[in-house]
Image (cartoon, rainbow, N blue to C red):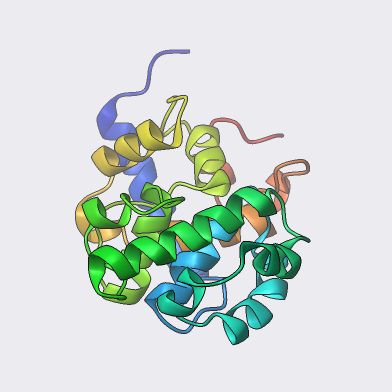
Amino acid sequence: MAQESKANRQKRAFEVARRMNERYGDAACALNYHDAFSLTIAVLLSAQTTDKAVNLVTPELFRRWGDAPAMAGADPKEIEEVIRTIGFYRVKTRNCVGCAQMICSQFGGEVPATMEELTALPGVGRKTANIVLNNVFGIVEGIAVDTHVFRLAHKLKFSAAKTPEKTELDLLALYPREMWGPINHQWVLFGREVCIARRPRCLECPLHDLCPNAEV
């Protein structure tokens, strides 16, 4: 099969965005949070774990340690007990406490609002930073590439990159900046409802005619 031109790939990408907006125009973050700190911690906890599982533990977590100063002084063993039902809870506990301590020591107890400062926090990568900047501060620096976005970008042949970071670069080059904002939330919902990893519903998919990997 001949290699697709950039112009045709971008045309497909724009149509994907149009249909996603039509279907998920009001898509929002699936994690429960109330401010920048709680969202930062919730996204940190969501790595390799479902949002549903995170939402089950965060009410008690934030009841007991609801801001950076409280979590910075927490006993890690107590946090472990609260979040032990999610994957990698010991590592995530260290990151939660370390993140809170750095927010207090270097940023006056407030979550910073730049990509560079956010990604300096323990456990916070570009995905987490993009979600916090977009949802709390209204700043669109990029596209948060989680497992759903990574999978869909490759299934749609918008990227062949091996890492989320390089996949994000491909998507940023494909879409103009004004279209970056809603992509993560919309694609996550689509990945959960239609393009399910183990059993994609291709015959019911509204992107069937746009997907080179659609099952027939």
Query: Farthest top residue?
Result: 1
Pick the residue in front: 13 or 62.
62
Give the vertical position of 127 relative to 170 (above or below): below
Coordinates of residue 92 in the picture (x, y in percent): 59, 54
Q: How far across and down, in percent of the image, does residue 102 sit? A: 34, 61
Frontmost residue, 206 versus 56? 56
Question: Total marks drawn?
Answer: 0
Residue at the spot x=54%, y=31% of the render? 212
Q: Is residue 161 above or below residue 207?
A: above
Q: Is residue 182 visible?
A: no
Q: Quadrant of residue 167?
A: top left
Write the residue at 68% across / 60% down.
Answer: 193
Quadrant hosting residue 31: bottom right
**In this picture, residue 96 sits left or right of residue 14:** right
Q: Going by the image, does 77 lie left or right of 39?
A: right
The quadrant of the rendering that contains the C terminus is top right
* Camera sees residue 85: yes
**What residue is at 51 percent from the left and 40 percent from the top?**
150
Task: Give how far across and how far down residue 75 sits, in percent.
Answer: 61, 68
Residue 123 percent location from the top left of the image = 46, 50
Q: Residue at x 55, y 80 (%)?
A: 65
